[in-house]
């Protein structure tokens, strides 16, 4: 995929090497985190792929940022 697209694979809040704040683990907040990251990286619109927990966040991202998400592919939620 990276041969044809810019791929951003970010750790969600509290996952992997990311910070672990005491709150903010709901899907809407995690989706807003990802939208903010894409803004910081200079992407006005973008496609989203989500797997497992990423499915829930990807759906929330597409629902909450309809003007920015051009495509959504999700699989195997929790």
Image (tube, rainbow, N blue to C red):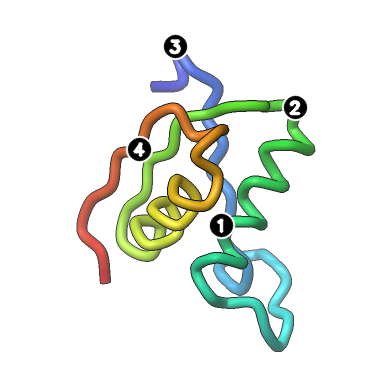
Point out residue 14 in the picture as x, y percentages from the top left corner: 61, 74
Residue mark closest to the camera, 4 vs 3: 4
Q: Quadrant of residue 47?
A: top left
Q: Which numbered disc flags the more N-terminal residue, 2 or 1?
A: 1
**Residue for point 35% across, 37% down:** 72
Asked if marks 3 and 2 touch (Cβ < 8 Å), the reply is no
Which of discs 3 and 2 lies nearer the camera? The answer is 2
Instruction: Say which element carries label 3.
Output: loop
Sequence order check: which comes first, mark 4 or mark 3?
A: 3
Q: Which of marks 3 and 1 is nearer the N terminus?
A: 3
Disc 1 designates what residue?
A: 31
Mark 1 or mark 4: which comes first in sequence? Answer: 1
Whichever of callouts 2 and 4 sits on the residue coming sooner in the sequence is 2
Distance, label 1 to label 4, CA atoms, is 13 Å
Q: Gap between marks 3 and 2, in whole Å?
A: 18 Å
Give the CA distance from mark 4 to mark 3. Answer: 17 Å
Q: What is the residue that sits farthest to the top in this orientation?
A: 4
Lower position in the chain sequence, tag 3 or tag 2: 3
The residue identified by callout 3 is 4
Numbered badge on residue 42: 2
**Real-space Cα separation, disc 3 to disc 1, in angstroms:** 24 Å
| Label 3 crowd (10 A; few <14 / some 14-19 / many >=20) | few
Q: Nearer the viewer, residue 67 or 11?
A: 67
Tell me, yes or no, whether the two marked residues, 2 and 4, touch with CB atoms within 8 Å.
no
Residue corresponding to mark 4: 72
Residue 64 left/right relative to 55: right
The answer to the question of whether label 3 and label 1 lie on touching residues, with beta carbons closer than 8 A, is no
């Amino acid at each position: 995929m990276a041969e044809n697209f810019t791929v951003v694979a970010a750790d969600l809040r509290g996952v992997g090497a990311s910070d672990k704040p005491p709150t903010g683990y709901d899907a809407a907040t995690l989706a807003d985190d990802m939208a903010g990251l894409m803004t910081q990286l200079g992407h006005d619109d973008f496609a989203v792929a989500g797997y497992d927990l990423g499915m829930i966040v990807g759906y929330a991202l597409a629902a909450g940022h309809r003007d920015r998400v051009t495509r959504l592919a999700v699989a195997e939620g929790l």
